[in-house]
Image: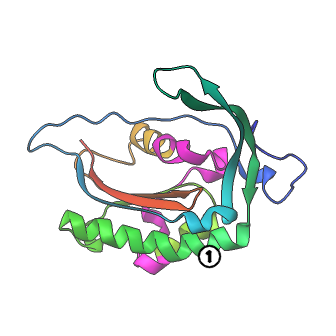
Amino acid sequence: SRWVDWDDRNSCILFGDGAGAMVLTKDEGSPGVLGYSAHSNGQGYEKLNLGYCGTPRLVTTPGDGTTLSSGGYQKIAMDGREVYKFATREVPRVLQEAIEASGLSIEDIDWLLLHQANIRIMETVAQRLGMPMDKVITNLSEYGNTSAASIPLALDEAVRDGQVKKGDIIACAGFGAGLSWGAAILRWG
């Protein structure tokens, strides 16, 4: 929340604080990542970003020295309408790419776990994939948009509540600043 512009009522109400992580280990023949796809397009920078304002400074090192930057981040800038259009267009595509890379089909997916940015985005993505909302893991109404933490937080809650079970296939997808977007297909273990 320290990066939110509290005077921008179009975006400040959309972001919350959170932290989450998932640890993966390699184990032949066991559950894990079955397929993935990721993209980035810096031309979308103006649509969603957290700019950095830095001042270069030269540090003495062998040779000509090294230039480092001292500074800080600005406030989150977002064009919500354009981010919505982007997410509802690209997230279904990247999920299809990841599903194809996994060798599975949409019918094999037990759960859809999306970045918890906006319920309308989640509904539209599910609809475009032909998945019912009862297969979409969501905790958005409880915590809001916790940015990069939203997928691991929602997954942890779904596992703890017994919603996700061993062997379930989960299609995860997120998007963010830059613009960047990606998906991974997991078999829960």
Q: Is residue 85 above or below residue 48?
A: below
93 or 44: nearer the viewer: 44
Q: Is residue 116 above or below residue 103?
A: above
* Residue 45 seen: yes
In the figure, is residue 105 to the left or right of 47? Answer: left
The main secondary structure of the magenta stretch is helix
Q: Is residue 60 above or below residue 170?
A: above
- SS state under label 1: helix
Instruction: Indicate yes or no whether the magenta region holds residue 46.
Output: no
8 or 185: nearer the viewer: 8
Residue 177 x/y as whole percent: 60, 56
In the figure, is residue 99 to the left or right of 90? Answer: left
Residue bearing the label numbered 1:
85
Identify the residue at horizontal 64%, vertical 50% (top origin): 145
Q: What's under tag 1, amino acid-wise?
A: Lys
Residue 139 x/y as whole percent: 57, 49
Residue 172 x/y as whole percent: 40, 56
Residue 120 x/y as whole percent: 63, 69
Identify the residue at horizontal 73%, vertical 66% (top origin): 79
Q: Which residues are magenta?
A: 127-153
